[in-house]
Amino acid sequence: MLGVQAVNGRGETIRAGGRVMKNVTGYDLGRALAGSWGTLAVVTEMAIKVLPAQREVRTVLCFGLSDPTGVETLCLGFGTPFEVSGAVHVHAELAKRFSDEEISGAGASVTAIRVENLPASARYRSSRLKQMLQAYAPALELDTQRSRAFWGDIRSLKMFQKTGRPLWRISTIPSSAPKLIGSIARKIDVRALYDWSGGLIWLETPPISDAGAVEIRRTLAEFGGHATLIRAEAPARAVIDVFQPLDPPLMALTAELKRAFDPVGILNPGRMYPGM
């Protein structure tokens, strides 16, 4: 998001950023508002940078990799000069829900790396990645049509849509992600999709009373990161903090920010944290 216009809790119109990419003046209010879930201001206008769709999309897949090896592979892909634009590792149980029958029928975890460019360049880069991944497992290459269907499933989180199980969004350091999920999995049955090379994890937990909140947040305290509850039944949502509890200094700073934008507390009170 390059620029934003919004109305704060005082009824004032505020503007930040601009309509051009080179913009370095003022506070970065755009990010603050984007992550505030409507508790600071009501956004009325925004300017967003978009890019044209690439003509060729290629995806290299490996099946059956463990979580540590899968995330290692994703990080390796991003470390190449091939301009990787997407990298995910998906647990076997979730991979069964992909639209592509060859992938859903494999009965194994899926590790995928995507490149996008002009046809000749994309094909060259995917072939090099495919050679690199042969050291981990035999690699399958998806053409543009199958790639777009595959990443469409990822974008819509198709594998989580009809289960009804609680769903968490976890952000952490990619190198810590497999250990974090492994620690949680020793206590509760979880299914994970690692995106952003492991920095973003979508985690499905059993329909237990706390949706796994105690174990998830205890483990995050050890490994670092934060978790947001995206979906759960009403009884669980009523007793669980949806957003990661903040340390006292950060909570005090957040409260000051809230008072600056919305001193009367009329914008989504309690939406993110009680009493705020």
Image (cartoon, rainbow, N blue to C red):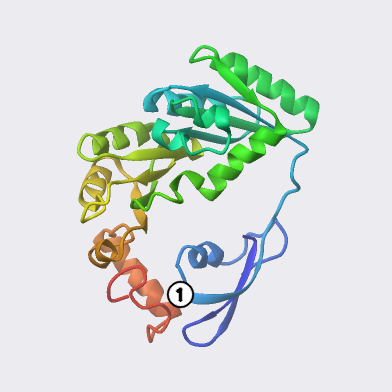
Say above or below: 119 vs 129.
below
Near-viewer residue (266 or 66): 66
Please tell me in which quadrant of the rendered image residue 190 appears: top left
Q: Amino acid at mark 1?
A: Leu
User: Residue 201's spot in the image, x, y percent?
Assistant: 41, 43
Q: Is residue 209 left or right of residue 11?
A: left
User: Residue 148's spot in the image, x, y percent?
Assistant: 66, 39
Residue at image coords 71%, 64%: 19
User: Residue 194's spot in the image, x, y percent?
Assistant: 44, 38
Q: Residues within 10 Å of mark 1 (few under 14, many from 20)?
A: many
Near-viewer residue (71 or 143): 143
Near-viewer residue (9 or 187): 187
Q: Is residue 50 left or right of residue 137?
A: right
Near-viewer residue (122 or 192): 192
Q: Quadrant of the N terminus?
A: bottom right
Q: Is residue 152 left or right of residue 122?
A: left
Q: Quadrant of the C terminus?
A: bottom left
Which residue matches tag 1?
A: 40
Residue 27 seen in the figure: no
Say above or below: 119 vs 187.
above
Name the element at disc 1.
loop
